[in-house]
Amino acid sequence: MKIAVVGAGLGGLSFGACAARDGHEVILIDKNDEPGGVMALAREGGFSFEQGPLILTDLREDEAVGGFLASLGIHLETVRDDRGLSTPDFDLIPPEEYEGPDWRKRRLEELFPAEKKGIREYYRFYDALMEIRFLSGEKKGLLNQLRLLRAFLTVKPYENMTCRRFTEKLFSDEKLRLVFNGILADFCADADEVQCFTLPFVNTETAFDKRIPTEKKGKLYYPSYRYIVGGCQKLPEALCAYILEHNGRFLSRTVAEKVLVEAGRAVGVRLEDGREIRADMVVGCGSARDFFTELVGEEYLDGNYRRILRDFRPMEAVFMLHLGVDFDPSAFQKQSLCYYYGSYDLHGAVEKLRSGVYHRGSDGYLIYFPDRHAPAFAPPGCHCVTIYTVCPDRLREGDWESRKELFADELIRLAEEHLPGLSEHIVAKKIVTAEDYRRLTHMKKSSFGGAVPIWKQRNPPYLTPVKDLIFVGAQSESGGGVPIVLLGAVEAYEKAIRANRAEGKGPAAGPV
């Protein structure tokens, strides 16, 4: 089959790699010079920067993403790392000397002695969900079934609770609730929108100390958090190279104008320059609403799919500040990545995001050093610093372009509380706003991380009402993220090929 993929972001590349593996002809169509979408690098003054801190799970070859890549012959060097957390009143930074896997629990009990009961219950809940995660991938057997039942009974009393209800039940102190709910702001999610079962998986203890073992009794048990050595762009580059090596094509600087639909079936793509590419299958990525409204046409969708497109909530944008500096910032921040929270009011922060009010860093931001795992990103004697915040796609007052320098200066002043003298050492600066991300991703509304993980929300399904038209990418997944998007695209490919085979049109999918 010939498969046209509109958008060479991670979702399109992963789908395309599966298709190329199985002998299908893949044509990637993208408006940018390089593959990868928001995984492509930003560059300025001899420095290179990732589009945020892409510290990823599942990259080991005995984990899902690493295993899939290895099946394609792609082997990426990775390094394990962790992240810090700082609030206005206390820090949760890994101690210099390793204090065991439970040091955060003990630290919280010291900080909040009146909350010991709730803290211990949270970690009982956490352990049970980690057990369920592990056992779901193990062979069935009586012992494992009993272990699974015990873990399930531990978490069952909380299964109908949101993150807000759950943390309010366990903790009376809002500062402690922030420790676990705060990361939801990264997803532009309110704690009352997300099921509480999400919390352990976005607060896995191994994310906060790279020295915590990930194995139990010789088996991988907890996820590890890793950077790709040399930069995250090596992942989309490797997938694109694989497609090209398997008779595929990459049409860069090319804009798809229309998906061609005949008799309820996608049959190709018309490009902006008038050329048509006929195909047996079309794959769309990026903004679901833009893709189906402008490239496909809502008249081809059924009422259910139109309702999903109308009701699902994409995430908001980010304000990204990349700095090249002539000093070593790790003298002040020991970790490559640290979250600095400025407010305990997560609900208020999300409300501002959604109403077009930018907090200007006061609600929180993070500081990230990408050259720690990619030394070539900075010239000799220099280093990279990225500061970013979540923000509205469009401002209620003013616009991003006219105010970006002011906002960048404000972030630098805030960051100097942790990196003293930062402003005096800047030798390169690149500001990336929501407007820039709209252009990069070809979206009318910047949605940096995909879809908000709202409980029971339906995101646009892979299989669409138009036959042989598939939709993949972050907006098809709850919460987005590199592993979720990649594995989602693999699942989408398997479903598409099965549907195609059911019509007698093609071979079965290959091994994953």
Image (cartoon, rainbow, N blue to C red):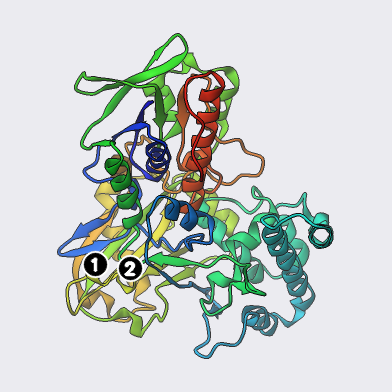
Farthest residue to the top: give it.
Answer: 263
Q: Looking at the picture, how far across and down is residue 390, in whole percent?
A: 43, 55
For this rendering, which residue is in front, 96 or 87?
96
Q: Quadrant of residue 19?
A: top left
Would you place residue 12 above or below residue 387 in this image?
A: above
Callouts 1 and 2 close, C-beta under 8 Å: yes
Q: Looking at the picture, how far across and down is residue 60, in whole percent?
A: 48, 63
Image side of residue 21 versus residue 225, left or right: left
Hey, what amino acid is under mark 1? Phe
* Residue drawn at 35 percent across, 36 percent down: 443
Dot 1 alpha-carbon crowd within 10 angstroms: few under 14, some 14 to 19, many 20 or more: many
Judged from the image, the secondary structure of the residue bearing numbered disc 2 is helix
Q: Quadrant of residue 294?
A: top left
Quadrant (top left, top right, bottom left, bottom right) of the N terminus: top left
Determine which residue is flagged by label 2.
370
Would you place residue 381 above or below residue 28 in this image?
A: below
For this rendering, which residue is in front, 321 or 268?
268
Would you place residue 248 above or below residue 87 in this image?
A: above
In the rendered structure, find residue 456 and report the number of the disc placed on it: none
Image side of residue 128 versus residue 232, left or right: right
- For residue 83, say whether it is visible: yes
Measure the alpha-carbon separation of dots 1 and 2: 8 Å
* Residue drawn at 15 percent across, 63 percent down: 45
Image side of residue 387 versus residue 100, left or right: left
Hey, what amino acid is under mark 2? Pro
Q: Earlier in the sequence, mark 1 or mark 2?
A: 2
- For residue 171, say whether it is visible: no
Judged from the image, the secondary structure of the residue bearing numbered disc 1 is helix
Determine which residue is flagged by label 1.
377
Dot 2 alpha-carbon crowd within 10 angstroms: few under 14, some 14 to 19, many 20 or more: many
Q: Looking at the picture, how far across and down is residue 439, in whole percent?
A: 28, 40
Would you place residue 283 above or below residue 387 in this image?
A: above
